Image (cartoon, coloured by chain):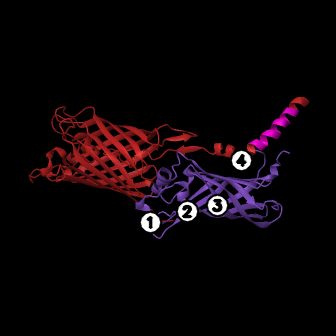
Chain colours: A red, B purple
Amino acid sequence: MSAKIFYTMSLVMLFSIPILAQESLLKDLENEQKGNNKISGAFKSSRVINGHSIEMIGAGMMDFRILHRFGPVSQGIGELFGLDQASMRLGFDFGLSKNLTIGVGRTTFKKELDGFLKYRIIQQSTGYKASPVSLVAVAGLSVYTYKNPDPAKPIPFNDRVGSYFQMIVGRKFSDHFSMQLSPTLVHRNLVAANDDNDIFALGFGARYKFTKRMAFVVDYSYVANGLPKTTGANPLSIGVDIETGGHVFQLHFSNSTGMNERSFITETTNTWGSGEVRFGFNLSRIFDIKKSR
Amino acid sequence: MPLDAQDRLLSRDASIRFFSTMPLENITAVNNQGLSVIDLKTGVIEISVLLKGFVFPNALMQEHFNENYVESSKYPRAYFKGTIQPFNDIRLDKDAVHKLIVKGTMQLHGKSKEINSHAQLQIKEGKIIGDAVFDLLLDDFSIQIPKLVKDKIAKNISINVKAIYQVQKNNL
């Protein structure tokens, strides 16, 4: 090594060290520490409005969900814009682990019980082994329990059952904006003569968070096949999420009344075009049910 | 004069714990991956921690902490830089407990605040253990607590730092 290079290098080192010392001594370590950084909070709740979102409720948590759907707003003041008619679903979701949730619920319409299993396969993350999207799989089952008014013709159990399978791909694009797509297959054991047993739908969900605790949300399902075009409609819900600590309120307007996948995907007959829009809300309250450490 | 490697103490697994103590609810969260360095030549101390790395008793609290309070995607780290006094008589080859005063600036949530705290550096059989306890006021860092949960989250958060330092082998 020539003396000149050595001299230059020593000079560089001599001057660069005091300059670096002005900054953080930890810069390199901080950069090294970035690692895999999971992205969470794409949606305020585990549902966009009707459909599942890419969010999970967390290990050891229970989500108590009360859903209400009212009558058409177009009924006017005589029916208090639909509020005189209400159907509801009570549900409990349990976070078995951070990536696995099971849930059960019961809806007043058809006295229907439903349950589901929701598993997050991939969580959106940055850094090492990054993933640009979250991927969530859901499988669910529903059984309606209302009795045929004619006691001589009971409905066999098998005919009461429906099921669905869903993959959700979603991404939190920024602190404000998240979007997801959810191809869904709904199967009904017993259907009307002109309907198909299997219905394929593509769900679309998005939110725009406009304050720390409030967001606009849109939940839409495009029913691709299986429903008679004359009566079937695509459920579209538009609403606002309000988060207040442990509660999330999801207030919305929708053309659907269903509160489980079988119901809102296959039984929506009203349309926004004809003004058959209803008010509804979801109330979610999260409890910590694991043993305190 | 180039820095002597012996003069720097480094910790990559500093434990940073905070407590919010209220009659209705006590909340504590911990991060065991804090970074800290002490330069014994100058008395400069730095502590840096990723806010996303704080682990809470439950997932909802953790989400609220990151999303609503510290906004960790916008401001990923809490960072402290200051000086320790006195630092001249700290010798790593002699067991002792050094009582220190730490003075410096805390950066959190896009805001800076001067902080003074008592601390100690214990040297015992070659182990170097740093401890400090101090309080932060959420108001100083523009972290707002909504009325609905104001009985559950303290305005005054107590911070506890414990770091085991290694003598740095090579210069950064």
Residue beneath disc 2: B157
How far is disc 1 from disc 2 in space, using C-alphas? 14 Å
CB under 8 Å between callouts 4 and 3? no
Q: Which of pointers 2 and 3 indicates the residue nearer the eye?
A: 2
Q: Secondary structure at mark 1?
A: loop
Q: Are marks 4 and 3 on the same chain?
A: no
Residue beneath disc 4: A25
Q: Which residues are magenta?
A: A7-19
In the rendered image, which quarter contains the C terminus of chain B?
top right
Chain of the residue on which disc 3 is drawn: B
Q: Are marks 3 and 1 on the same chain?
A: yes
Chain of the residue on which disc 2 is drawn: B
What amino acid is labelled 2 in the image? Ile
How far is disc 2 from disc 3 in space, using C-alphas? 13 Å
Indicate yes or no whether the magenta region holds residue A191: no
Q: Which of pointers 3 and 1 indicates the residue nearer the eye?
A: 1
Q: Residue at x 74, y 42 (%)?
A: A20
Q: Residue at x 55, y 55 (%)?
A: B141
Q: Position of residue B160 (x, y in %)?
A: 62, 62
